[in-house]
Amino acid sequence: MDIRTVTDHFSASPQIDIADVATLAEAGFKTVICNRPDDEIPGQPSAQAMQAACEDAGLAFHFLPVFPGRFTLDLVEQLEAVLGSCEGPVLAYCRSGTRSTMLWGLASSSKAPSGPLMEAAAKAGYDLSPLCGAMDARFKENG
C-alpha cells in the first residue's frame, strides 16, 4: 500500500484491496473513505465489499464517490461532515489518492486558507494548486 500522510488525522492512498483492511486496522486507522466510484475499472473491489471488510475489522466506512473532475459542493460538505464527526486517523482512497486529497482540500478550506492545505498535500505528493481559487473562495465565504 502507498499510504501518504497529509495530516495527523487524514491520509490518502491509491486503491486498496480487501486484504489490506486488516493491515489498516493494525496500523491504527479507524475510518476508511472510498472516493472511487464502483466499476471505474474492471476488477476493483466494490464499495459494498470494502464496507463489509472494514466492518469486520472494526473500521468505520464511508462511500463518497468522486468522478474525475467532478467535485460537487454536496460531496465537499459530506466529506467535511464525515471528517468532523468520525474517529481518526482516516484513510481515503481513489485510483491514485489525488481525488481523495483534492476533496479533503476543498472540505478543509471552510476552516483553513489554501496555503497550509496545499503545503500539507504537497508534502504527501499531491498537487492542490488547480483548486487554489476554489479553496480561497470557500475559506473567505466560511472563515
Image: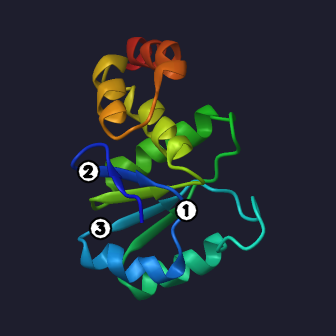
Q: CA distance from mark 1 to mark 3?
A: 16 Å
Say which residue label 2 marks.
Answer: 9
Residue sitting nearer the eye, 80 or 68: 68
Q: Tell me the quarter of the image containing the C terminus.
A: top left
Q: Is residue 93 above or below residue 123?
A: below
Would residue 111 be seen by someone viewing this image from the given angle? no
Rendered residue at 52%/80% (across/down):
18
Q: CA distance from mark 1 to mark 2?
A: 19 Å
**Image coordinates for residue 41, horizontal then vertical, percent:** 76, 62
Say which residue label 3 marks.
Answer: 29
Rendered residue at 37%/19% (across/down):
114
Say which residue label 1 marks.
Answer: 15
Left or right placement of residue 43 versus residue 86 in this view:
right
**Image coordinates for residue 49, horizontal then vertical, percent:** 61, 80
Left or right placement of residue 23 versus residue 27 in this view:
right
**Image coordinates for residue 104, horizontal then vertical, percent:** 43, 39
Which quadrant holds residue 111?
top left
Q: Tell me the quarter of the image containing the N terminus.
A: bottom left
Tell whether label 2 touches label 1 (CB within 8 Å).
no
Left or right placement of residue 85 versus residue 126 in this view:
left
Of callouts 1 and 3, which one flags the residue occurring earlier in the amino acid sequence?
1
**Callout 1 secondary element:** loop
Q: Residues within 10 Å of mark 1 (few under 14, many from 20)?
A: some
